[in-house]
Image (cartoon, rainbow, N blue to C red):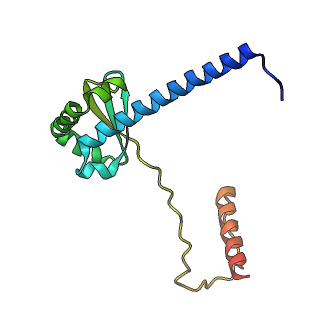
Amino acid sequence: MWGLAPRCDESLRKMQNDEMKILANGMERHRAIQAIAEAGIDSMPLYDLFRYAKIKGHTLFFVFKADAARFEFKHQKERILERMRAYYALHKERLKKANALFKDIACVVIAEVQKIEAKKEPLLYKERSSGNFTIGCSDPKLRALFENIQQTIKTKLS
């Protein structure tokens, strides 16, 4: 491997240490934000719909999984704030050190996209057509549809 000059090696270590400190500070901030948010909604029905919290500007945003949480959040906003104030009183130093301070709270809903799989159910009736019929339609689009139906019946029978 390439040998680095001692000065370069020291500056690389210093840079890595600085990056690790920044990363550690960011992680601590994230943990502090999640902790105060969870303290606000703990033991509420909202807790099951909670994804994560994030501070933007001076607002702490609660991100929920379902739209029903938005209505519940608006209804319980003052209660959530009271619980968060109690948590802040106990953990003031940690929150200040992590720069997890905000002035207001709001909520956002990011719903999961659910894939709906079509169930292939067996036919409840027996196909009575053999697919051998004449198409007397002169419109080319309709004729193509009938031909498609005819082919589908023939392939299902074979």
Q: Is residue 133 visible?
A: no
The answer to which image quadrant residue 104 occupies is top left
The image quadrant where one finds the N terminus is top right
Which one is nearer the viewer's eye here, 104 or 71?
A: 104
Q: Residue furthest right?
A: 1
Q: Is residue 115 left or right of residue 5?
A: left
Taking the view exactly as shown, the residue that stands out farthest to the top is 7
The vertical placement of 133 against 13, above or below, is below
Eyeballing the image, is 135 above or below 87?
below
Q: Residue at x 70, y 82 (%)?
A: 157
Q: Is residue 79 above or below residue 46?
A: above
Horizontal and vertical percent position of residue 119:
53, 70
> What quarter of the picture does the C terminus occupy?
bottom right
- Residue extending farthest to the front is 6
The image position of residue 21, as x and y in percent, is 51, 25
Residue 11 located left or right of residue 49:
right
Nearer to me, 87 or 152: 87
Residue at coordinates 56% horizontally, 73% vertically from top-left? 120
Q: Residue at x 61, y 19 (%)?
A: 14
Q: Nearer the viewer, residue 79 or 131?
A: 79
Q: On the image, which quarter does residue 25 sit in?
A: top left
Relative to 1, is 62 on the left or the right? left
Counting from the top left corner in percent of width and height, residue 79 is at 16, 40
In depth, the one of 22 and 52 nearer the eye is 22
Question: In which image quadrant can residue 132 be found?
Answer: bottom right
How many tags in the picture?
Answer: 0
Q: Is residue 33 visible?
A: yes
